[in-house]
Image (tube, rainbow, N blue to C red):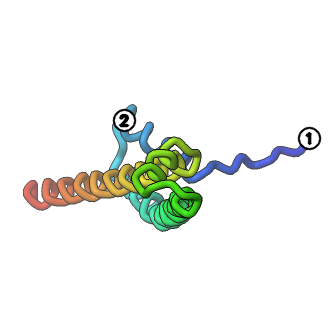
Amino acid sequence: MSTTAVTLSIRDRIKVIQTQVVTSALTPSEVRDNLILLTGLFGNVLDEHREADAAYHLLVASYVEGGDAVNRAEIRASTSAQYARAREAKDAERLVLEMIRGAKTFLQSLDTEMRLSR
């Protein structure tokens, strides 16, 4: 019987780290590992954000070319799957950035604590 490896999406990987941060007391080593992983994933998140924004703006442009005023085109587009994807990508970018900042702050505070205890 062969087993197939489960490949997690970028969002799933972020959620796993987020759950660890919320539900457990992470060791400095685990925080460092998460920081490295989040930093690596950040580029992928930025790529998704850029691609999702482009798809959304293409949709808005198609509505404008179809005769809608810009504000009406943006309202129509804001109910689309492209908008939802762009919003999700933007939220993921903000989340990863804040998680990176939090991990760095945690590690810096540990470093300061260790220096002061000497």
Label pair 1/2, CB-CB below 8 angstroms: no
Of the 4 image quadrants, the one containing the C terminus is: bottom left
In this rendering, is residue 22 above or below 34?
above
In this rendering, is residue 3 above or below 108?
above
User: In the rendering, at what x and y percent does residue 91 appear?
Assistant: 41, 49
How many marks the image carries: the answer is 2
User: In the rendering, at what x and y percent does residue 102 appear?
Assistant: 28, 52
Residue assigned mark 2: 22
Residue at 68% from the left image edge and 50% from the top image edge: 7
User: In the rendering, at what x and y percent does residue 23 appear?
Assistant: 39, 32
Name the mark nearer the viewer: 1 or 2. 2
Three-letter residue code for mark 2? Val
Of the 4 image quadrants, the one containing the N terminus is: top right
Spatial CA span between label 1 and label 2: 36 Å
Residue at 26% from the left image edge and 56% from the top image edge: 107
Residue at 49% from the left image edge and 66% from the top image edge: 50
Residue 53 visible in rendering: yes
Residue at 51% from the left image edge and 60% from the top image edge: 64
Residue farthest right in this picture: 1
Q: Nearer the viewer, residue 11 or 59?
A: 59
> For numbered disc 2, what is the local secondary structure?
helix
Residue farthest top in this picture: 23
Q: Nearer the viewer, residue 22 or 68?
A: 68
Determine crowd level at label 1: few under 14, some 14-19, many 20+ residues with C-alpha closer than 10 A: few
Q: Which mark is residue 1?
A: 1
Precedes in sequence: disc 1 or disc 2: 1
User: In the rendering, at what x and y percent does residue 95 appear?
Assistant: 37, 49
Residue 14 visible in rendering: no
Q: Is residue 70 left or right of residue 112?
A: right
Residue farthest front in this picture: 67
Q: Quadrant of residue 62?
A: bottom right
Three-letter residue code for mark 1? Met
